[in-house]
Every structure is written in structure tokens, then in C-alpha cells.
Amino acid sequence: MKTKFKGFSLLELIVVLVIMLIIAGLIFAGISTHKHATLVARTQVQFLEYEAAINAYCREYGDLPAFLHDEELVLLSDSNNSEMFIKTLSGQNTDGKPLSANEKKLLNPKGKVFHTFSDGEFFMTSDGIRDRKILVDAFNNRNIFIIVEDPFDEDTIISKSKFPENVRKYIKDEGVKSAVVIFSVSDDNHTVISNSFNQYF
């Protein structure tokens, strides 16, 4: 005798659908969290490399790069600062061509490569084109700041007062013990990434 198959009831279908949506949500949340952590780690490595490049430049020439001389806080979203940073540390123009004689003399007389910039470090426009004159963190965020004190003093402390007001709350004590601090702040001020004061949200 054959048993007649009854279809699923509407309630059963709804329960299965809800369970599938919950599982999909958990998977998506896990992927999203992992992606965020990966981008934070990539940004931290990028900033460590920038700090090392600035320190290597100072050891080589006995002085700070020219564009860092007179500024307490340098913002790389300013295309002029970003371009100078790239030229100084790579020893070449943003298009990969050699610096002019005047630029070489001013920025990097020996034409040494202190850092090689990869495509992922340049701002991606909405149409997917990389702007090789503007640097970004791994989140494609242009708000990268540099503060440099005396790179030749191992006990240098960068005062809390030199940081933007919205960043000071993340800094313990009266400042950061470092000669070079590089950090980024998202447009909504909710994400701050720095190696120097161990902040990342």
C-alpha cells in the first residue's frame, strides 16, 4: 500500500527559511569581522613600513624629509603632502619616472628607495581607477596623519596635544613614546588605526 506524500506546511517552510537566514547571517557576520580584522592588520603593517622608511631616511641623510620639517601634523589626504611623501621615500615620481634634478636635490639626493609603494596603497576612485598621487590605508581611507618629533632621540615622546582632538581620547598618559607616529581616522571618526598607541576599532 502506497503512502501518500503530504507537502510541507507553510509553517514548516517558514521555520526552515528562518533557520537558513540565521545561519546565513552568522556566516556573513563572521566573514565581515574577519575582513575588517584583515584590513586593520594590513593597515598596521603599511604604517610600520612608513615609519621604518622615515627612520631609514633620517639615518641616511641625518635630517627629516623636507616636507616634514615645519609641520607638527601632516595630513596625507592633502595631495601635495602625499605626492611629496611618495617622491621622497621612493626616490621617483608618482608615475615611476625619475625625479628632476631639482626635486632629487631637495627630496632624496642619492635617489635611494626607502619604500616601494604598491597599487593597494593608492586611492581608488568610484570608477575603480587608482590615483597614484593620494595614499590610503587598507580601507581606502585618505585620512592618514603623520607626526614626527626628534627621530634621533630614543626617548622622544610626542605630546598628546599634538594629536587631533578626536584622537586624544585614545592616547594613554601624556603622549606616545615614539619619534614617528602614523595613524588613520575614518570619515566618521569611529575607526582609528595606529601601531604606536595600539588603537584600532
Image (cartoon, helix red, strand yellow):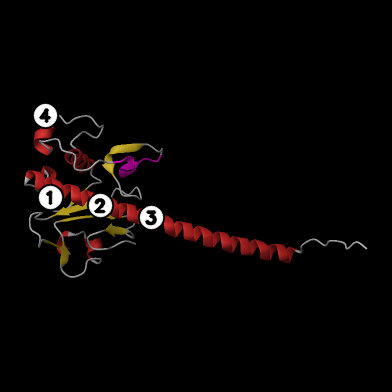
Q: SS of the residue at dot 2? A: helix
33 and 111: which is toward the camera: 111
Coordinates of residue 80 in the picture (x, y in percent) = 20, 40
Which residue occupies 22% across, 52% down? Answer: 145
Say if residue 187 shows up in the picture.
Answer: no
Relative horizontal placement of residue 18, taking residue 110 as reference (left or right): right
Q: SS of the residue at dot 1? A: loop
Neighbor class of circle 1 (other Cα within 10 Å; few <14, some 14-19, many 20+) is few
Neighbor class of circle 2 (other Cα within 10 Å; few <14, some 14-19, many 20+) is many
Residue receiving disc 4: 101
| Quarter in which the C terminus is drawn | bottom left
How far apart in space, not on screen, are marks 1 and 3 (Cα)? 32 Å
* Residue 188 picture quarter: bottom left
Eye-nearest disc, 4 or 1: 4
Q: Amino acid at mark 1?
A: Glu
Say if residue 28 shows up in the picture.
Answer: yes
* Residue 111 picture quarter: top left
User: Over which residues does the magenta segment extend?
Assistant: 118-126
Q: Of the numbered discs in the image, which one, if any, rests on residue 71?
A: 1
Total count of labels = 4
Residue receiving disc 2: 47
Q: Amino acid at mark 3?
A: Thr
Residue receiving disc 3: 38
Asked if residue 64 is among those painted magenta in the image, a careful observer would answer: no
Q: Amino acid at mark 2?
A: Phe
Eye-nearest disc, 4 or 3: 3
How far apart in space, not on screen, are marks 2 and 3 (Cα)? 14 Å
How far apart in space, not on screen, are marks 1 and 2 (Cα)? 19 Å
Which residue occupies 34% across, 43% down? Answer: 120
